[in-house]
Structure formats: C-alpha cells, structure tokens
Image (cartoon, rainbow, N blue to C red):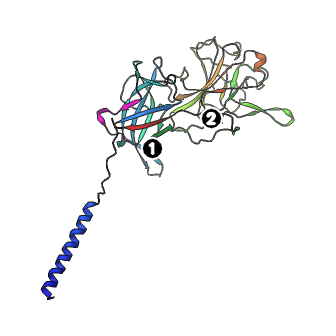
C-alpha cells in the first residue's frame, strides 16, 4: 500500500470517527421536560368550619418563595410571586367546599389563565377578609409545603418544635388542657375568693400532701413570627359576650394580658383573675364590690387558635382546640382541676394533588 492510499484511508477513518462522535453528542438531550399542572385538588383534614355567618374566609394561594440569607447570615424567605386560586368557605360536616355565595363547589381549584402550578414552590391556605382585595394576608392561619410531590402534604408552618409541654401515656390524646377556678391576685390567698379567676393548670401532691401547681397545658409552642396565637376564653349565659383570659404562644408561660388581675402574685401560666377593669362593652360589670363568680349552669371555658393580628378581638375564632363546662356550684369549683375536651386528635392539615385539566 503506497503512502497516498494510506493518507486517504486515514482521512476516511478520522472523518467517520468525527461523524459518529457528533451524532452521539446530538442524541444526548440535557433539557428537562416541563412539568405542567393547571389545577389543585384539595383535601383538608380537621380544617375548621368557616361558613356564611363568618366575617372571614379561606383563600388558596400558590407562592414562589426563595430562601436566602442577609448580610448577618440570618435566614430569610423572599416572596418572588404569588397567585390566588380563589376564596372559599368550608364545612367539616358534610366535608364540602362552598363559594362565598354559599353555593356548594367542587374541590378542584384551577389556576387563572391556565398558569403552571409548578412555576411556584409553595401552596398556602390563609384567612382573609370577605372583600376581594387580591392581597395575601399575613394574619392568617398559613399552611404550606416547600417541595412538590404527588400528593402534596401540607401542615401548619407555625410551631417552633413538635415537643409538647408534658409527656402523657400512649393511649391519651397529644393535645391536653386542664383548668381550675380560683383567683390568686386579689389578696394573695386563692382560698379566700376562689371563684373569680380561671387558670389553665392542674395540681400535684407535694411533700406532706400539699397541693402544688402543675403546668399541664400540652400544646406546641407557636413560632414568634407566626401570625396566630392561642387564646383562652370564659363564657356564662349572663355575659354579653365571651371574655378573653389572654393570648399566648407559649403554654409554659404567662399570657400577654393582665388587664383584670389584682395587685398580688399570680402564677406564670396562661389565665386571668377578673378582679377589676371590666371592658366598657361588657356586662355584667365586676370589681371589688361586685365579684364575678365563674360557676353556674351553661358556663363554658375554651381555648382557641386565633389569627394575629386579630380581625375581631372581642369574639373567639371558630377554631376551638379545647372546651369544657364551668362547674355548676361553688362546692364543685373548689374540688380541684377540670379536664378540657380536645376537639382535635391532630391539628389541621391538608393533602393536595396537582392536576392537568
């Protein structure tokens, strides 16, 4: 074989190799296919009823949130964009969605103009005013998820930790509350006027058989930046409205309001003594000469989860976590603590599935 033939064969081999290599490279497609969805199927769990008599409603949102840090290396979340999928009412029974005109609707929420659900990374349900202002409220009960899967699981993004105040037996509910009827702050001796206050605690027996206060309010600690609080309430048929015992986020410590407490010591837990300064719009009045007695037929105590800031501070939000009857007589009120019924085995959450219509 002469040199000319060798050169021709070498050129053919090189050109063939380049061609094969180029074709192979073109066959590798590094572009990921677009994932598309233009509707969300929503399945709430334990979501509190909001219906036509409410002054607020739920709203479903898609939100794109970016996680970043500031100049001091603090974690920050920036909202890049958000999209409302509509406002709605909800009834736990018969497990149904309703429009704001009280017409039953299905559980599928379509995106406006066919926008892609996967252009967002968070689903939220918030509490909103009935008027449509197109603005996502920051005073709502916000559920969210950060990673989309099938199905999407959502829960309250509210709590510092899942740990509760006390550890209970396995067969007991996780959410636990007790209360006592007695006042601590009037003269320093709760036995003298035990019927003017309500405090969310229990008693244990200490050394010598003496009663000792026990912190037994067992609910998660709410994050400092979460837009909800817990709030205690007491009501009797002769009250013009329910009376708040104060808002709080940490069940282990005192609540934020002591407007009615007397001049003496009181425990560092949620509760209130109704000794002075009745609200201007409240009846009956109470004070040193008109002591309030938190006993009687039809009386109730409860703890709610409230939006913060509160759109209606004089009325409890319908998300009642615990409730109990007040003792019917002074004798029974002096008998010790009263367990409260938990209305939730678990706190509300939701399941969602992204659909293509």
Q: Nearer the viewer, residue 54 or 41?
A: 41
Q: Residue furthest left?
A: 4
Residue 167, image x, y percentages: 69, 40
Above or below, 208 relative to 26: above
Q: Is residue 273 magenta?
A: no
Q: Which residue is mark 1?
A: 146
Visible residue check, residue 138: no
Which numbered dot is residue 300? none
The answer to which quarter of the image holds residue 108 is top left
Q: Residue furthest front?
A: 1
Q: Is residue 116 magenta?
A: yes
Q: Label 1 near label 2: C-beta < 8 Å?
A: no
Callout 2 secondary element:
loop
Residue 95, image x, y percentages: 49, 25
Callout 1 secondary element:
loop
Q: Earlier in the sequence, mark 2 or mark 1?
A: 1
Which class describes the residues within 10 Å of circle 2: few (<14), some (14-19), or many (20+)? Answer: many
Q: Residue furthest bottom?
A: 2
What segment carries the magenta color?
106-117
Query: Image point 66% across, 19% down: which residue?
Result: 276
Horizontal relation, residue 116 to residue 206: left or right: left
Q: Quadrant of the C terminus?
A: top left
Q: Nearer the viewer, residue 123 or 172?
A: 172
Residue 197, image x, y percentages: 70, 22
Q: Which residue is mark 2?
A: 219
């Amino acid at each position: 074989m002469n040199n000319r033939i060798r050169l021709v064969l070498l050129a053919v081999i090189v050109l063939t190799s380049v061609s094969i290599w180029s074709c192979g490279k073109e066959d590798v497609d590094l572009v990921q296919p677009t994932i598309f969805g233009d509707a969300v199927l929503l399945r709430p769990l334990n979501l509190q009823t909001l219906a036509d008599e409410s002054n607020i409603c739920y709203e479903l949102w898609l939100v794109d949130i970016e996680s970043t840090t500031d100049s001091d290396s603090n974690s920050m979340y920036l909202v890049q964009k958000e999209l409302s999928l509509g406002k709605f009412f909800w009834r736990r029974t018969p497990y149904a969605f309703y429009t704001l005109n009280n017409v039953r609707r299905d559980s599928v929420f379509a995106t406006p103009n066919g926008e892609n659900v996967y252009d967002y990374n968070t689903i939220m349900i918030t509490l909103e005013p009935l008027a449509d202002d197109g603005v996502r409220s920051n005073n709502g009960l916000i559920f969210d998820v950060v990673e989309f899967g099938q199905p999407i699981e959502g829960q309250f993004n509210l709590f510092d930790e899942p740990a509760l105040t006390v550890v209970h037996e396995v067969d007991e509910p996780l959410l636990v509350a007790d209360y006592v009827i007695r006042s601590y702050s009037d003269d320093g001796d709760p036995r003298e006027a035990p019927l003017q206050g309500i405090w969310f605690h229990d008693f244990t027996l200490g050394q010598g058989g003496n009663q000792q206060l026990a912190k037994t309010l067992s609910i998660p600690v709410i994050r400092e930046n979460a837009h909800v609080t817990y709030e205690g309430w007491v009501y009797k048929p002769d009250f013009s409205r329910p009376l708040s015992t104060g808002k709080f986020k940490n069940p282990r410590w005192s609540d934020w309001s002591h407007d009615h407490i007397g001049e003496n010591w009181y425990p560092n837990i949620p509760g209130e003594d109704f000794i002075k300064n009745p609200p201007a719009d409240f009846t009956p009045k109470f004070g040193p000469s008109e002591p309030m007695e938190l006993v009687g037929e039809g009386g109730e105590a409860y703890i709610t989860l409230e939006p913060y800031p509160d759109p209606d501070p004089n009325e409890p939000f319908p998300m009642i976590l615990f409730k109990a009857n007040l003792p019917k007589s002074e004798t029974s009120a002096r008998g010790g603590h009263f367990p409260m019924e938990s209305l939730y085995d678990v706190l509300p959450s939701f399941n969602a599935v992204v659909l293509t219509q």
